[in-house]
Each structure stands twice: as C-alpha cells, then as structure tokens.
Amino acid sequence: MGATSLVHWRNWGIPSAGSPDAMIAPFWDDLVQSGTNRVYAWHDAANDRFIVQWSRMENRHGGQQNFELILFDPSAHPTTTGDGIILFQYDAVNNNDSSRGYATTGIQNLDGTDGLLYTYYNDSPRAQRRSPPGGPFCSPRKRYRTFLPATSFRRALR
C-alpha cells in the first residue's frame, strides 16, 4: 500500500485530504505501544491470509483496544468480483478519546478521493459512501466486507 509522509497522530474522516491514501483503518486513533501492549503481524500461509493484531493497545485516555485486521488472498479465497476480503475483528474497543476526535474506522482508495466510513468522531454512519459518484474508487468490481461486533455489512462501491 506504500509509504506516506503523514506522521501526525490526528485521525480524520474518510475520505479526507488529511488522511493517508490507500488506507485500511480498523481503528485509527493515537494508540500507545509500551510494555506488553504490542502490534503483531503474521502471514498465515496455511490459510492464505495476513493478520495484524493490536493487542492491549491504549489511547491517551487509558482506553484499551484489542482488534485484528485480516487480509485474505483473493487467489485462495475467491469472490465473485475477484477482490480480496478485508476482515476487521474486535475483542475489546474503548472509543473514549473525546479530546482527539475519537477513532476512525473504514477504508480509503488509492488517491484519497473515496472510501467507506464506519465511524468517525463517535458517529457511526454504517459504511456510508463519502465521495461523489464516478470517483476512482467507484468501480463495479470493488467490494469489501467488514465485520464488527454483533453486526456485519457488505457494501459494493459503484
């Protein structure tokens, strides 16, 4: 997905000029890694997936987060569109960072002009499309799945 010059902690809505392009954001907030609070990555070759786990990560208000991002290899986990499946899984989320805009959850396209927003600033529009029709992320072949606690949704981007 590439490098970014953006290093500021501030999260924004999706899409946004203030956010990195080509972004997958399972929980974009100012999280602190210390002690046993870690981010782990694992290539699960046997099941053709790549897993990133945020374990016991805390924000500046002491809210602890445990969640995963799983990327499935589309050649081993085919979809009708040929796109890869993106899975967000949450064990514990404390979205209590009110002084810094809470957290952002969603995905954004390669040039930051379109995306799916699940939550920003403690508002959950349930994966509302946030760009004008016809943007570069609007191919009929683009489809993503995101699974959240006790809910799931599937939204096709046109």
Image: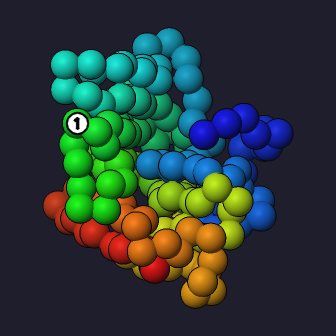
Label 1 crowd (10 A; few <14 / some 14-19 / many >=20): few
Q: Quadrant of the N terminus?
A: top right
Horizontal relation, residue 10 to residue 54: left or right: right
Residue placed at 67% from the left, 36% from the top? 2
Task: Tell me: residue 56, above or below residue 114.
Answer: above
> Where residue 72 appears, x then y in whole percent?
30, 39
Comparing 97 with 88, the one in front is: 88
Horizontal relation, residue 91 to residue 65: left or right: left
Task: Tell me: residue 115, above or below residue 129.
Answer: above
Can the viewer see residue 155 in this picture?
A: yes
Residue placed at 68% from the left, 69% from the top? 113
Find residue 99 and report its image quarter: bottom right
Q: Circle 1 sits on which residue?
A: 76
Comparing 142 with 53, the one in front is: 142
Can the viewer see residue 37 in this picture?
A: no
Element carrying mark 1: loop
Find residue 149 and report its image quarter: bottom left
Farthest residue, direction top: 35
> Where residue 68 appears, x then y in whole percent?
34, 37
> Where residue 47 appears, x then y in whole percent?
19, 26
Find residue 128 and report its image quarter: bottom left
Horizontal relation, residue 85 to residue 54: left or right: left
Residue placed at 58% from the left, 29% from the top? 32
State how the image is colored: rainbow
- How many numbered marks are there? 1
Give, as a three-letter code, the residue at label 1.
Ala
Task: Tell me: residue 10, above or below residue 52.
Answer: below
Residue placed at 51% from the left, 49% from the top? 24
